[in-house]
Amino acid sequence: MSYSLIPYAINLKQLRASVGSKKKALVNAVIKGNPKRFKEVPPSGEIALREALIHLIMGDSQEDDSGHVYGYALEQLCSHLGTQLKFKHWCGVHWEVIEIFQLDTLLKASGSPVELPFIPDFPTIGHIVAEDVARTLKDVQERKAETADNDLRGLLSELAGWLKKAQISRKDLVLFYY
């Protein structure tokens, strides 16, 4: 099965300040941005995405067995506060591709930019702080220059594009893989 790597250019300071901010208007604005997603009924025994978002923003305690729901709530908050960057080549990629580019190490090492309960499966979350974007871009460009495979070059080009956009806008990147 294949999944997607979804990037958001965002100001991490703003994101971190939003978590626990107790701003009900922010909760409402995030939900209003994607009402259909927040109306989905969760499987039995799982908290709703709406509840997870409320817990994040209001600073309420989080349910340890629902880490994945908080991960998806964080993505909705990133979508509201930041910009989802276009992804074409990273749509429908296997974990092996993530490993080839050593993004598995980046995702696992950096993890979520805010504290969440343990997520045993998906989404896998990682981030690149603005200060590391230039170095990461250089690494990606070097790997692209060494790669002859056109499919891999397409993936690297798209990743470099995300990093360039983050660099130009002085934003951080948050990545979600699911």
Image (cartoon, rainbow, N blue to C red):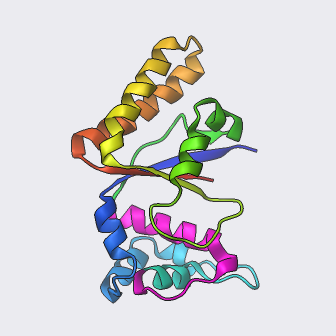
Q: Is residue 59 magenta?
A: yes
Query: Looking at the picture, how far across and down is residue 7, in whole percent?
Result: 45, 48
Magenta stretch encompasses residue 77: yes
Q: What is the x, y in percent for residue 146?
A: 51, 12
Locate residue 23: give its quadrant: bottom left
Give the residues drawn in magenta, as a range: 57-81
Extreme front residue here?
Answer: 109
Q: Nearer the viewer, residue 4 or 101?
A: 101
Residue appearing at x 33%, y 80% in the figure: 26
From the image, which quarter does the N terminus lie in? top right
User: Quick check: 172 above or below 155?
Assistant: below
- Left or right of 30? Residue 55 is right
Residue 22 vs 130, above or below: the answer is below
Left or right of 31: which side holds 14? left
Magenta stretch, main secondary structure class: helix
Give residue 132's position: percent from left, percent from top.
35, 41
The structure residue drawn at horizontal position 51% and vertical position 37%, both measured from the top left corner, is 88
Question: Eyeballing the image, is 122 above or below 60?
Answer: above
Residue 157 in which image quadrant = top left
Q: Identify which residue, 106 or 3, lies in the foreground.
A: 106
Percent x, y for residue 69? 61, 73
Question: Relative to 24, is 94 on the left or the right?
Answer: right
> Which residue is depicted at the point 52% across and 29% down?
155
- Tell me which residue sits at (52%, 74%) in the image: 36
Is residue 160 shown to the viewer in this render? yes
